[in-house]
Image (cartoon, grey):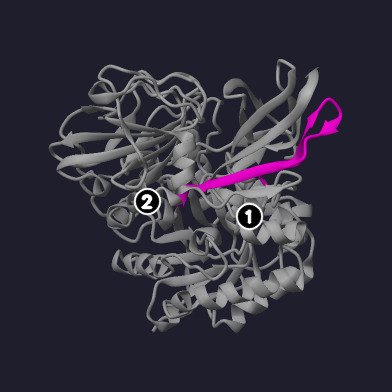
Amino acid sequence: MSTFAVGDEDFLLDGRPVRLLSGALHYFRVHEEQWGHRLGMLRAMGLTCVETYVPWNLCEPEPGRYGDLAELGRFLDAVAAAGMWAIVRPGPYICAEWENGGLPHWLTGRLGRRVRTDDAEYLGHVERWFRRLLPQVVERQIGRGGPVVMVQVENEYGSYGSDQGYLRRVAELLLDCGVEVPLFTSDGPEDHMLTGGSVPGVLATANFGSGAREAFAVLRRHRPAGPLMCMEFWCGWFDHWGTEHSVRDAVDAAAALREILECGASVNVYMAHGGTNFAGWAGANRAGEAHDGELRPTVTSYDYDAPIDEAGLPTEKFWRFREVLAEYAEGPLPEVPEPPARIAGPVEGAWAEWAPLAEVLEVLGGEESVTPMPPTFEELGVDRGLVRYRLEVPGPRQPYPLVVTGLRDRAVVYVDGVRAGVLTGEDGALPEPVAGPAVVELWVESLGRVNYGPRLAEPKGITGGVRHERQYVHGVRARGLRLDAVEAGAVAKVPFRPVAAGSESGSESASESASGSGSEGVRPAGPGLYRAVVEVAGAGDASLTLPGGTGDMRGFVWVNGFCLGRYWGVGPQESLYVPGPVLREGANEVWILELEGGAGGSVRLA
């Protein structure tokens, strides 16, 4: 068995100096059947190590209800089979542009800002989680014949807090769970970040996208000895909905990578291959230098302008990085793997069936809550999805402004069944006053919980109240729809209507029935669940678009029960990546949950 250690100047493999050439590839953002190909691409680029986070909220969506925990172990076995080492970053907080930074909504909903501190209740949950997760990491450490060479303590804590007691507790817990490989922290190369985020006796590493010499000089002021490593070399960046697509020049990125290596440092390319935020797990950020401004939700694609693109194909950045990394390889680099199969040609299918959103909620939603004030998503047990708030403005009374306070994130509002506007931001009012009596519905979707900065752990939904003039409207009926409730067995119970040939969705009420009847079918009245069948010959990777959709289209897509993630007409993302293993020869079933009403008349795979 081998040993891996932190020396005075270098990492040591069996006592010999070694440089880590690592790349980030998050197993949960790549279809499992494609892990082998993506790892082969990393090897061909010249990397010898893989880094991955572990998202707690994906693994434990409800207290004590676990998903596929063994998935991490299978990924580490795939890393070993590819002849690579592994760096594991289990959090408990991971950032990663992931929903809530990886923290479960049921935990932050209860504890709020007590998370990521030396709080006994929070740390009790962390310990329970680590003791459930870490055995599969411990048994795959390099000293036991596995690929794992390092494990991270928390993540970029210096960008958030200064609770040294908390960091020490996390480090001690990792050791107590059996972690024997070196521990490390990673933070930006700034004094306050390194003092807040590093732990005495634990290797400190730095995260940056350029200026390696200056960054390592700052790190050396804090840690005069030990190997240098850029734990996140930001070779690209992620996108937010409604913004420009982020691109970094390949030659510039390759020069920055070369500078890191010329400093004698190790590196982890973030991201080497980004993958996809499937199933609505994309997080969100707050605008501004203080990260406390307008909400900016992250798109479904996590392509990251990485050297290996979302579909696993090499980019110009891949070839430039391969040239640099080849100079540090012990021999010739492996051949680049053949690209994954792609569908033989473009195919399209019209929407065949539709059910209005209110009826979908009745079948797939949770229990209705009746409370004086609006409950949050956390109080309703909704992580990803939407909530319908229904209330009655008493009357008779003259028209007054209808104001929603503490709104997160986006509400489509109907008054007496007629769409009255869309509200965004913390506080907003309908454009036209409302007279009483009136029935008001607010369909609120979470656009992703904040994953970075001081607004981490904030609740979703209506966190304040609804006011008519200055008066709160009490007596709120709320019902949530979780995304994971949209699965094959449940969807089969939805009362779909046949769609009339040639019809396209409108933008009427989420509760309104469609016009038309009988064998001629109906015209979908906007928001709801749509179903189509697309015939595929030559299954493989594909991109999915919604021809004829409008700029206000917004919702989620499933292919054969697999949730691809969110689509939104505001861009910059215009299509969704469909992994080849999700498609099959012949008939493929596609569902979309349209929330605003502009999804067009068909679905296209190309």
As helix, strand or loop, the secondary structure at mark 2 comes to helix
Question: Which of the 4 image quarters holds residue 549?
Answer: top left
Residue 284: image location, x then y, percent: 60, 41
Q: Quadrant of the N terminus?
A: bottom left
Give the residue furthest to the front.
396
Question: Which of the 4 image quarters holds residue 360?
Answer: top left
Say which of 81 and 345 sits in front: 345
Please determine whether, in this image, residue 465 is positioned above or below residue 106.
above
Task: Tell me which amino acid carries mark 2.
Answer: Ala
The numbered dot on residue 206 is: 1
For the residue carrying disc 1, how many other residues have a C-alpha within 10 Å: few (<14), some (14-19), or many (20+)? many
Instruction: Note whether residue 532 is visible.
Output: yes
Going from N to C along the chain, the mark reached first, 2 or 1, is: 1
Residue at 39 percent across and 56 percent down: it is 47
Question: Which of the 4 image quarters holds residue 593?
Answer: top left
- Residue topped by disc 2: 490
Residue at 57 percent across and 39 percent down: it is 447
Q: Nearer the viewer, mark 2 or mark 1?
A: 2
> What is the magenta range?
459-484
Q: Left or right of 504: which side holds 417?
A: right
Residue at 70 percent across and 33 percent down: it is 392
Give the residue furthest to the right.
470
Magenta stretch, overall SS: strand
Between marks 2 and 1, how big is the CA–CA gap? 47 Å
Say which of 483 and 191 sits in front: 483
Instruction: Note whether residue 305 is visible.
Output: no
Q: Left or right of 436: which side holds 549?
A: left
Residue 475 on the magenta span? yes
For the residue carrying disc 2, how many other residues have a C-alpha within 10 Å: few (<14), some (14-19), or many (20+)? few
Residue 512: image location, x then y, percent: 48, 26
Say which of 469 and 483 sits in front: 469
